[in-house]
Amino acid sequence: MKYKLIFILLSAISVVLYHAMAHSDQPVAGKTGAPSENNCSQCHTGSPINTEGKVAIQFSQLTTGYEPNKEYPMEVIVEKDAFTTFGFEVVAIQQSTNKTIGTFVIADATTTQLFSEIVDGETRNYIGHTKAGTKTTSLGKSSWNFIWKSPSTSAGDIVFYVASIAANGKNTRFNDWVYTSSLNISEGINATENLREAEDFTISTNYQTNQLLIRYRHLSSSPIAITVVDVKGNLIEAATLNSGNMGNNETVLFLQPHLSGIFFVNIKLNHKIIVRKIIL
């Protein structure tokens, strides 16, 4: 009887350690708090949700809405004093159908990964941390950057649900802190219009000099505002192009020397935002 009890206890401990280590490799899908989902507190215990810390999810800093078939940089930020181990997962849900919507694109394969889960008979797609992505060099804070590509057609309001954990680093599911949040994004101004001018912009990159050659056909007299940002939304370069100059045009943007990585060229015209991704 004594040995049987010891065996049961060891088995229980092994299960706990297995799940703790598995969760550090990849989050358990379907725990964001989205419709028909639970959250990480179903397994991780130790404190009430959303206390003594927080998680936030940020959409592109250049717009409060989205347009179909565009890529937008996003960031998840979690904070908990004195902690150095964090995790997260995000799902994008179409509000009218409760189905996953759009496509997550990896910006940093070292810290983030894609995975899926069946919820209510439908496949939901997620992005979350990798094992390497659970560690942070900033005491009490961590963040992850990724890209979300909007659906090819109008989809109405979209809600991003995020769940995050501040872990005690002891490879157990006890005495951890759980945070949840959500972000509602609507279609941008004129998002459903035919963006004919979007097809008239081409961007060529000179990798040796970090110059961007932008060719476009301007169909109105309105000025064109162009900004270049990195995946965190930090401004790299800005310019206003050919105000009042209609017809075929081209211009060159000179970026910082030795600049490298993924960047987004945002072209704003008449309340419309056209996004082009470039890699330097």
Image (spheres, rainbow, N blue to C red):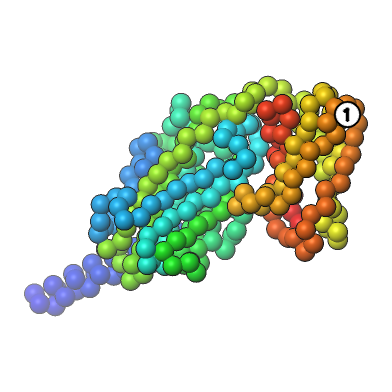
Left or right of 200 on screen, residue 131: left
Any part of residue 277 in sight: no
Any part of residue 120 in sight: yes
What residue is at 41 percent from the left and 57 percent from the top?
A: 79
* Quarter the C terminus occupies: bottom right
Q: Dot 1 corresponds to which residue?
A: 245
Question: Measured from the top left, where is residue 267 in percent x and y?
Answer: 73, 37
Q: What SS does tag 1 mark?
A: loop
Q: Is residue 201 above or below residue 231?
A: above
Q: Nearer the viewer, residue 146 or 100?
A: 146
Q: Nearer the viewer, residue 128 or 204?
A: 204
What residue is at 53 percent from the left and 30 percent from the top?
A: 186
Question: Measured from the top left, where is residue 272 in percent x and y?
Answer: 69, 29
Left or right of 79 on screen, residue 198: right
Q: Is residue 65 above or below residue 114?
A: above
Q: Nearer the viewer, residue 200 or 250?
A: 250
What residue is at 77 percent from the left and 58 percent from the top?
A: 256
Q: Nearer the viewer, residue 198 or 56?
A: 56
